[in-house]
């Protein structure tokens, strides 16, 4: 299974917000940190806001912040909001009438079990886990100067 670019940058946006000590993160700053367009990030922001993972503050001094604590946002939360399809094979589709084995196939059962394990792993990691795993994340994102050695 391959996650979309949208999911990748949604996670990155949340990591930026979690790492940023400021009350709000500006989309322009996030875009610059990841060398991606602001328009693309605004597109990603909509489903994240709708799901309550991010709060958007409008106005001249506006920006975005996490909708809840970073340790309460799992990777599974993000993936479920940003991915449209979890079909690992044609037989996962609703219109999978082509195969005569669709209702009794061991492959279908194995793939469902694999997808469940994938979801379990995603649910076991939070945005906070990802940020804490990289002590130099603030420097890497341009949020602070080079840490002292």
Image: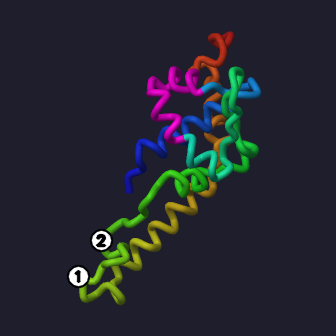
The x, y position of residue 15, in whole percent, is: 61, 35
Q: Main secondary structure of the magenta part?
A: helix
Is residue 47 visible from the viewing direction of this image? yes
Q: Locate residue 23 relative to residue 97 in the image: left or right.
A: right
Q: Is residue 109 magenta?
A: no
Q: Which residues make up the magenta segment?
A: 27-44
Say whether residue 19 is visible: no
Left or right: 98, with 122 as reference point: left
Distance from Cα at disc 2 to Cα at disc 1: 9 Å
Residue 13 lies, with reference to residue 145, above or below; the image says: below
User: Which quadrant of the rendered structure holds the N terminus?
Assistant: bottom left
Q: Is residue 83 above or below residue 23?
A: below
Disc 2: which residue: 90
The verdict on residue 40 being magenta is yes
What label sits on residue 98 in the rendered view?
Answer: 1
Comparing 146 with 3, the one in front is 3
Q: Is residue 105 left or right of residue 53?
A: left
Residue at 63% over, 55% down = 124
Q: Earlier in the sequence, mark 2 or mark 1?
A: 2
Determine the secondary structure under disc 2. Answer: helix
| Residue displayed at 68% across by 50% down | 52
Q: Residues within 10 Å of mark 1 (few under 14, many from 20)?
A: few
Q: Residues within 10 Å of mark 2 (few under 14, many from 20)?
A: some
């Amino acid at each position: 299974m391959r996650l979309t670019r949208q999911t990748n940058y949604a996670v990155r946006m949340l990591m930026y917000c979690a790492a940023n000590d400021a009350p709000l993160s500006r989309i322009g700053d996030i875009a610059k940190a990841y060398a991606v367009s602001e328009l693309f990030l605004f597109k990603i922001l909509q489903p994240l806001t709708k799901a309550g993972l991010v709060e958007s503050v409008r106005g001249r001094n506006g920006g975005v912040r996490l909708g809840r604590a970073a340790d309460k946002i799992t990777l599974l939360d993000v993936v479920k909001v940003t991915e449209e399809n979890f079909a690992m094979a044609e037989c996962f589709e609703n219109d999978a009438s082509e195969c005569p084995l669709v209702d009794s196939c061991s492959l279908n059962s194995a793939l469902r079990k694999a997808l469940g394990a994938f979801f379990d792993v995603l649910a076991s990691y939070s945005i906070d886990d990802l940020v804490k795993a990289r002590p130099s994340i603030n420097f890497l994102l341009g949020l602070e100067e080079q840490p002292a050695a």
